[in-house]
Image: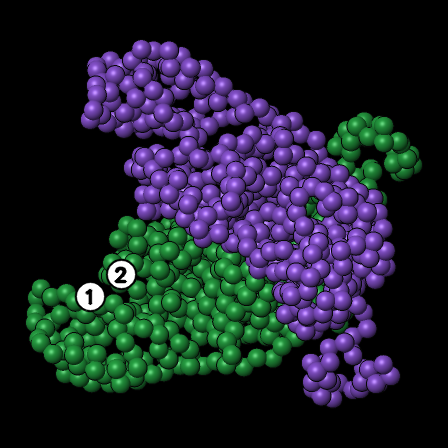
Chain colours: A purple, B green
Amino acid sequence: MIIGIMKQRQSIMEQKKLEIVIEDNPIDNVQKTVGLALLGLGTVGGGTYRVLTGQLDEIQKRLGCRIEIRHILVRNLKKASLRVQDSRILTNRWEDVIEDDGVDIVVELMGGMEPAYTYIREAMERGKHVVTANKDLLAEHGPTLLELALNKGVDFMFEAAVAGGIPIIMPLEKSLAGNHLTEIMGIVNGTTNFILTKMSEEGMDYREALIQATELGYAEADPTADVDGLDAGRKVAILASLAFHCPVYFHDVHVEGMSMISAKDIRYASQMGRTIKLVGVARDTDTGVEAYVCPMLLPKSHPLSSVNDSFNAVFVHGDAVGDAMFFGRGAGDLPTASAVTGDILSIAENILHGSSGRIGQLLYKKRPMKRMEDTYNRYFLRLHVEDRCGVLAELTEIFARYEVSVAQIIQREHQKDDLAEVVVITSLVREGDFQTAIEELSYRTSVKKISRMIRVYE
Amino acid sequence: MIIGIMKQRQSIMEQKKLEIVIEDNPIDNVQKTVGLALLGLGTVGGGTYRVLTGQLDEIQKRLGCRIEIRHILVRNLKKASLRVQDSRILTNRWEDVIEDDGVDIVVELMGGMEPAYTYIREAMERGKHVVTANKDLLAEHGPTLLELALNKGVDFMFEAAVAGGIPIIMPLEKSLAGNHLTEIMGIVNGTTNFILTKMSEEGMDYREALIQATELGYAEADPTADVDGLDAGRKVAILASLAFHCPVYFHDVHVEGMSMISAKDIRYASQMGRTIKLVGVARDTDTGVEAYVCPMLLPKSHPLSSVNDSFNAVFVHGDAVGDAMFFGRGAGDLPTASAVTGDILSIAENILHGSSGRIGQLLYKKRPMKRMEDTYNRYFLRLHVEDRCGVLAELTEIFARYEVSVAQIIQREHQKDDLAEVVVITSLVREGDFQTAIEELSYRTSVKKISRMIRVYE
């Protein structure tokens, strides 16, 4: 220790020699230490452990402090011991973490609602800063946790909870703070984007693409949360809250999945100059906030339409910045660990500069949520009708009654029967009105089947 | 004032009433004020003035402080008076700004080297924080200014200096701080990207596209800085410095323009599955840092290849995050103002929380710069050769001597003479070796003309 202090007093002339010493023994010359506890050593926990331990030397040089992982909370100590250098930091007792005053930051990477929710609240109550990648928890309790953090004067960061490694939360909060953001839209689920890319580029059907996604590890054994849009819905809730500065919960988000999309829909869309993506959309309109997840036809010129495979991207529109997009890996151990580590380092910097708890009023507005039927969209409609004169006139006549006009139309003769397949893209229309029009259409004897209805962007 | 304090003491129950009061008179309830001076009221200065004045109310709610524009330094007071609400804040005397202790942040939006450089240094010397959008200055004196800011304990931010409205500096510094970044590559000049998009999509030649860019206001009367890659080169210097944590200056960047690119090159590239873009590239390799700007063939699947028109994008590769990209408007009054405003608000937040001057050691490494001839690339080569047997063998024989192999080849018979046009994409080769091979090739009688040599990404 005395040697350490003496070394620090050496002149700048000897800086080079000093630097070598730092590299040999990183602990010697740096007094400040920020203590961490990781909760969980699964995919993201393991990735974060690897990224952090690989970057210790760099971090020290940049921040001028030492990051120390003091505990990793795991369920199975034996299994976990194979994955860390020093198994003494492993524990299966939450008390070891919460009662250790040396733990400045609790990094929750367990996922799920409980015990994560309790642990995070207890950590904040004890004045510990929190990083989490837990979107399920945030979409449900984000506003409560933000308020608790504000009251306790602790930092609370969650860059990894939306779009994995892609920096989006901090850019929204800081870099774009001068904007009134009116739209945020994202491909925020890699599994479904991989499936739709395979269907689109290789003509696979949904089942085939899902099997491939499962084989490659992109889809989980039970893919429901992905393909039904639930995962994306949680991310939309978080994004909408931050973009519009008002609490938006998962239950506020209208969610539709993508499993009904067929290779045929994708082919028709392509002929009409469009790509089908599962998108999460949030808009701040004069009459309220709309937030939904659904498959959508995007013009091929839209930046999101060329986001392929398991990549994610978040597109933002602000009054000053115009259109901006953030692209990258939305999942995976290392990309998610990248975001978690960025948060940890920001909090460490705050601790070093005595400026923690600057969370501010993130959700200072109260905005009404719009019902889905009150949103305005364009629609892609695929239906089978009798193959005879006058049927199209009947269709457009019903449409006209609800102020729906037809922007694009494709009609194909059916091979086997006397039916024709008609595909229409409409103009902008209030969803409720369009649904009434479709209902009326479905009563007509000339309309045999309404096969698909997909929203169309712009 | 007394009323103001009393209002603050009202209970939360009356919050709603209080909010209305805030909206009626935004100044009443907020005591803290952060004072600004804008230097310049041109495109970016005017945009920043508009964005700031339009956001005052929102800013106050979020930050809990008032932002006051105390001075705008202009050359022509009369002309400027038409552009502001209260012309009393205009001045043409720098003394008015620098001697005003109420000015916390100096926002330099004049551009150019002097007097901007002097003003920024003087502001820092006086303990004022600085925001700038001045890439020319940063590419030359960035490291000096960062050091001065560090010594003086002031904030120094420049998000707008690279890629305009796109948040890139803060994501690099904060969100991706856990990464070892190995590559940063960008389309960071909107003018040239517009020109190349027109040439690519509408088959225009360079002159025609440049005229259109000028007419639309994308290109300046003298487009040299854009088309010769100088503007992009300055941005690459700044990006490389921040990504690799070592000083990289404009004179370290190898710069080539794009005015020689022909519609024919673009057509051939397209046949070979590639798009031509003017890109700035910086890589951190084992043998040093490489930084250059040049036209480049990108695979159509690369995220940068679908960045069209005057849009910009910055692509990053890090060991943890993998590939990430940031897309948006790289210029224009409001997008640039968006970035400037984000910086102002971050600094204001630091002032309010007493945590200014946290700039840290951004450039703590010293890395050698690689010479261009030591970089490894693939090459697109278009040449005219005698249309006879054995010429291709001659070409590949010379290539083989320098360990260049041919990955793709197109040969076209010429209409008018006995020449054939050969277009080749090579494998990866050291630039110096390739140049020697090309020189040797140019001495052969069978080779009539080497028309083009463009680097190829991957």
Check residue B272 in the rendering and tell me which mark sits there, or answer none.
Answer: 2
A6 sits left or right of A267 in the view: right
In percent of the image, x 50 and y 67: which residue is there? B183
Identify which residue, A107 or A249, lies in the foreground.
Answer: A107
| Chain designation of label 1 | B
B7 sits left or right of B249 in the view: right
Query: The C terminus of chain A appears in which quarter of the rendering?
Result: top left
Badge 2 vs badge 1, beta-carbon distance below 8 Å: yes
Identify which residue, B77 or A388, lies in the foreground.
Answer: A388
Residue that carries the numbered disc 1 in the rendered image? B410
Q: Is residue B167 shown to the viewer in this render?
A: no
Identify which residue, B264 or A338, lies in the foreground.
Answer: A338
| Number of marks drawn | 2
Question: What amino acid type should be assigned to the residue bearing mark 1?
Answer: Ile
Quadrant housing residue B246: bottom right
Quadrant housing residue A10: bottom right
